[in-house]
């Protein structure tokens, strides 16, 4: 059972855990008007039944935040100050433009040679700072992107991570599974969806459907593809429902087969992942990793997108683009700029 607390009590718990170097997380689910707080305690009441799960892209690090008690506050009407706006310097992006454009060109060339059908290549941007306003940034994300999973988590070795991800990886409860295929991006209000975005999206949907048919017995229901809006960015989304007939599977088994999906890696999985490892040129860390909670048989996990790492007086922001045979490197580069801007514009720092 969750315990309701005041905003002041929440701030106090955050500070207490930070100064005691104890990992913690605060998060808000899409459309929900509550913010939850977990702090790690080995002497917890739930064991492996309730915890917050964080895993990096290459699955080298798994962080579990096991709470002794779960706390929450209720979100009230907008009541925050924007402070002075952070300045987005153009040279921050341009410093990486040639390197990333070359990577995009190489990815397109490999697809044309038939090595894979899709690959998601990404980049990171580093910005120096003196002070980061955690509370105000979190508030901005909540009120700007209510249809996303918003979180701040802290770990002594990995620093602070803040994010607002739109993509549900899996929701699993009592033999019922839901997966959101999110792929295909548009930011220009005057543009129309092209063959590139449709095919990119269909690759993800087909991968998920084929995987479930191959390993499990059950019934499918695919919702009609829809457009979701996140600020000025739009995505194509197809929700896939699957009901298991035979038995209740361990969610780890499903997760290990499902992840990484083509929306963050590519297709075929092994070849695209190998290309990313050899060519991306940096460690994604927890970007495009797994983030979410496990409550007994109720599992709700997301892909860690639109996120930033705050550590050692700098912010590291991440963005990627799904490359297919119909991609143009300039458009894909612009897409990553728009994605970075969508999160950077909500962060407050000096």
Image (cartoon, grey):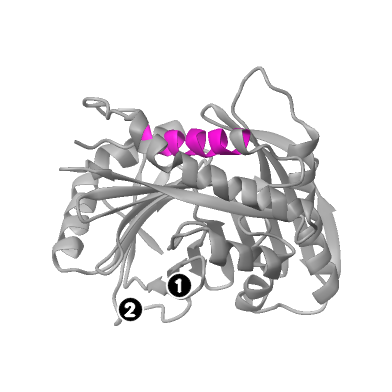
Q: Image quarter for residue 23?
A: bottom left
Point out residue 302 in the picture as x, y percentages from the top left corner.
55, 57
Of residues 192 and 296, the one drawn nearer to the viewer in this rendering: 192
Q: Is residue 3 left or right of residue 13?
A: right
Q: Is residue 245 left or right of residue 71?
A: right
| Badge 2 or badge 1: first in the primary sequence | 2
Reading the image, the residue beneath label 2 is 44
* Magenta stretch: includes residue 332: yes
Q: Which residues are magenta?
A: 331-345
Point out residue 1 in the picture as x, y percentages from the top left corner.
41, 64
Q: Residue at x 85, y 68 (%)?
A: 213
Q: Residue at x 30, y 81 (%)?
A: 42
Q: Cβ–Cβ below 8 Å for labels 2 and 1? A: yes
Reading the image, the residue beneath label 1 is 50
Q: Is residue 288 left or right of residue 61?
A: right
Of residues 33 and 170, the one drawn nearer to the viewer in this rendering: 170
Q: Please rate how many residues cluster around mark 1, counting C-alpha atoms within 10 Å: few if below 14, some from 14 to 19, many from 20.
A: many
Q: CA distance from mark 2 to mark 1?
A: 9 Å
């Amino acid at each position: 059972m969750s315990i309701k607390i005041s905003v002041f009590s929440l701030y106090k718990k955050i500070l207490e855990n930070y100064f005691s170097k104890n990992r913690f997380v605060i998060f808000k689910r899409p459309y929900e008007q509550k913010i939850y707080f977990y702090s790690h305690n080995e002497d917890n009441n739930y064991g492996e039944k309730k915890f917050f799960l964080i895993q990096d892209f290459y699955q080298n690090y798994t962080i579990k935040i096991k709470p002794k008690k779960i706390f929450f506050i209720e979100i009230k009407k907008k009541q925050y100050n924007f402070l002075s706006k952070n300045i987005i310097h153009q040279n921050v992006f341009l410093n990486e433009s040639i390197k990333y454009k070359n990577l995009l060109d190489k990815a397109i060339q490999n697809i044309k040679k038939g090595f894979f059908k899709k690959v998601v290549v990404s980049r990171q941007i580093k910005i120096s700072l003196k002070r980061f306003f955690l509370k105000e940034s979190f508030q901005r994300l909540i009120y700007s992107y209510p249809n996303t999973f918003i979180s701040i988590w802290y770990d002594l070795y990995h620093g602070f991570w803040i994010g607002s991800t739109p993509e549900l990886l899996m929701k699993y409860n009592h033999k019922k599974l839901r997966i959101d295929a999110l792929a295909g991006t548009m930011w220009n209000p005057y543009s129309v969806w092209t063959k590139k975005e449709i095919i990119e999206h269909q690759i993800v949907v087909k991968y998920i459907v084929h995987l479930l048919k191959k390993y499990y017995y059950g019934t499918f229901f695919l919702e009609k593809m829809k457009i979701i809006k996140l600020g000025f960015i739009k995505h194509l989304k197809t929700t896939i429902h699957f009901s298991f007939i035979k038995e209740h599977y361990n969610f780890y088994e499903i997760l290990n087969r499902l992840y990484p999906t083509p929306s963050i890696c590519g297709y075929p999985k092994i070849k695209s992942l190998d290309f990313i490892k050899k060519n991306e040129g940096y460690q994604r860390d927890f970007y495009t990793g797994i983030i979410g909670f496990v409550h007994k048989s109720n599992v709700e996990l997301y892909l860690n997108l639109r996120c930033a790492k705050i550590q050692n007086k700098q912010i590291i922001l991440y963005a990627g683009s799904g490359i297919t045979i119909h991609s143009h490197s300039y458009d894909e580069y612009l897409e990553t700029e728009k994605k970075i801007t969508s999160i950077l514009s909500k962060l407050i720092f000096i």
